[in-house]
Image (cartoon, rainbow, N blue to C red):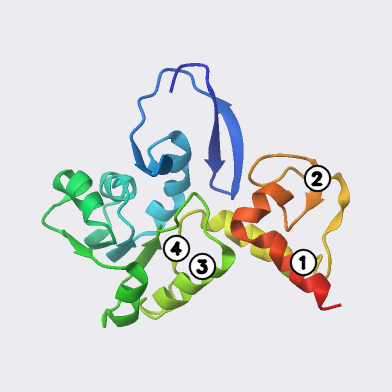
């Protein structure tokens, strides 16, 4: 990524914004079918800051990706005792694991959901990052978190990719509008793209709501009137 490029990055409070690169930046990407599944841009690194600060004890990471979360966790958190990583794809293991493995880290090749259903043990902290693109739908995120909650010790909360943004969206859904979207017009910036002149879908514009299947939520509500 060249110096001066305007890039999208992430604020830990749960929204995206744009910033200009102050220097050239090499980027590692994991791609599939021409699309980027994961990279190590400033956006990913910013999005991991809070999750890394919350991790304690015996950790479960669902989704290895390029190993960025695992790498940063080791570098920045001294309270981690053991890390279990679950990854679906053998190809990812062959690309990444050789540089990531260590004495306190184990890798399990399995479907993350199936692993959570039958793991038979509990963890102090769980982080999930398995969506097929940058965003998972609300239903997929919720189903994964519900499975993981039973694998957590005590009253700890499951953590996942962009959790702060999803929390803001869910809060807005609870506050309203509940039966229809608000009219088109000036709104607070969309949490993802920053657009202000838009319809409002719990803090998002229509285009950004679609990957979360959020616009469908409002359509279904309207049909029930």
Which badge, 4 or 2, is on the more N-terminal residue?
Answer: 4
Name the quarter where the N terminus is drawn: top left
How far apart marks 4 and 1 lie (CA) works out to: 29 Å
Dot 2 corresponds to which residue? 198
Which badge, 4 or 3, is on the more N-terminal residue?
Answer: 3
Judged left or right of residue 161, residue 172 is right
Which badge, 1 or 2, is on the more N-terminal residue?
Answer: 2
Task: Please give the label number shown on residue 219.
Answer: 1
Dot 3 corresponds to which residue? 140
Q: Marks 4 and 1: which is nearer the front?
A: 1
How far apart marks 1 and 2 lie (CA) works out to: 17 Å
Relative to 178, is 101 above or below?
A: above
- Mark 4 neighbour class, 10 Å CA radius: few under 14, some 14 to 19, many 20 or more: many
Q: Marks 4 and 3: which is nearer the front?
A: 3
Residue farthest to the left, as pictured: 103
Residue at position x 30%, y 74% in the image: 115
Relative to 17, is 112 above or below?
A: below
Which of the pair 117/148 is nearer the observer?
A: 117
- Mark 1 neighbour class, 10 Å CA radius: few under 14, some 14 to 19, many 20 or more: few
Task: Please give the label number shown on residue 159.
Answer: 4
């Amino acid at each position: 990524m060249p110096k001066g490029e305007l890039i999208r990055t992430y604020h830990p409070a749960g929204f995206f914004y744009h910033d200009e690169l102050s220097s050239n930046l090499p980027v590692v990407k994991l791609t599939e079918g021409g699309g980027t599944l994961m990279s190590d841009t400033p956006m990913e690194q910013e999005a991991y800051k809070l999750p890394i600060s919350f991790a304690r004890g015996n950790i479960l990471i669902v989704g290895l990706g390029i190993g960025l979360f695992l790498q940063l966790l080791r570098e920045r958190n001294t309270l981690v005792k053991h890390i279990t990583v679950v990854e679906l794809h053998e190809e990812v293991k062959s690309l990444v694991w050789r540089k990531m493995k260590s004495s306190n880290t184990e890798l399990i090749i399995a479907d993350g959901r199936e692993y959570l259903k039958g793991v038979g043990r509990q963890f102090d902290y769980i982080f999930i990052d398995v969506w097929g693109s940058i965003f998972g739908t609300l239903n997929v995120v919720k189903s994964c978190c519900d499975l993981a909650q039973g694998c957590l010790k005590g009253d700890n909360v499951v953590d996942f990719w962009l959790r702060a943004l999803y929390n803001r969206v869910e809060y807005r859904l609870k506050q309203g509008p509940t039966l229809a979207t608000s009219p088109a017009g000036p709104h607070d910036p969309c949490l993802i793209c920053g657009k202000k002149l838009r319809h409002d879908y719990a803090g998002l514009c229509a285009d950004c709501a679609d990957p979360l299947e959020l616009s469908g939520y409002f359509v279904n509500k309207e049909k029930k009137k």
